[in-house]
């Protein structure tokens, strides 16, 4: 339904951002903050004093609402009408190449940083710890008891 066909009560049931989105859809073009908020004030019969008191909050709401996008010409539009284009410069691509070290290179660097008393070890190698040799025998000594037996 067009905004001009709605009653004041219907319009008042919408937030300013809802109304802004409806206006941008109907107008099919971007609008700057003052123009957009003037249209909302006109629809809701708000005074110039209301306009002056509320435009700052309206702008803040637009900046935090993901529905809207602020364009280079300082006008607002609906985000879904715009696509984001990411352009990488040559400097950006150089940085990415620096980050593509292999796992082996990183392992070698870590080995070089480790103290001399720490031995190099493959990730899949088993640890030979004499204190852990008796772990399998522990299962034989365990008994399961009910909570009632604890009292």
Image (tube, helix red, strand yellow):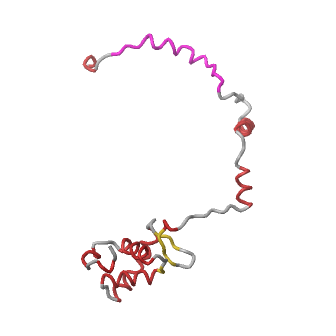
For the residue pair 23 and 33, the one nearer the viewer reads as: 23
Residue 71 position by quadrant: bottom right
Report the side of 65 relative to 116 (left or right).
left
Q: Where the N terminus falls, by quadrant?
A: bottom left
For the residue pair 9 and 5, the one nearer the viewer reads as: 5
Question: Residue 45: image x %, image y %?
Answer: 30, 85
Q: Judge whether residue 142 is colored magenta.
A: yes
- Residue at 33% x, 77% y is 3
For the residue pair 72 and 151, the one nearer the viewer reads as: 72
- Residue at 52% x, 16% y is 135
Vertical side of 137 occupied by 112: above or below: below
Question: Residue 108: image x %, image y %?
Answer: 74, 36
Q: Where the C terminus falls, by quadrant?
A: top left
Q: Judge whether residue 135 is colored magenta.
A: yes
Q: Report the magenta residues as a range.
A: 124-144
Residue 11 position by quadrant: bottom left
Question: Residue 139: image x %, image y %?
Answer: 45, 13
Vertical side of 65 occupied by 3: above or below: below
């Amino acid at each position: 339904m067009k905004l001009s066909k709605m009653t004041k009560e219907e319009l008042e049931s919408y937030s300013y951002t809802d109304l802004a989105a409806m206006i941008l859809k109907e107008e099919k073009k971007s609008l700057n903050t003052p123009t957009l908020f003037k249209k909302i004030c006109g629809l809701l019969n708000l005074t110039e004093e209301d306009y002056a008191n509320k435009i700052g909050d309206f702008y803040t709401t637009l900046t935090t609402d993901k529905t809207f996008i602020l364009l280079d010409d300082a006008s607002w539009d609906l985000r879904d009408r715009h696509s984001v284009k990411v352009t990488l410069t040559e400097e950006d691509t150089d940085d990415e190449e620096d980050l593509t070290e292999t796992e082996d290179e990183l392992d070698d660097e870590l080995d070089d940083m480790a103290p001399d008393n720490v031995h190099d070890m493959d990730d899949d190698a088993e640890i030979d710890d004499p204190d852990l040799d008796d772990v399998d025998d522990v299962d034989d000594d365990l008994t399961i008891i009910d909570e009632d037996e604890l009292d």
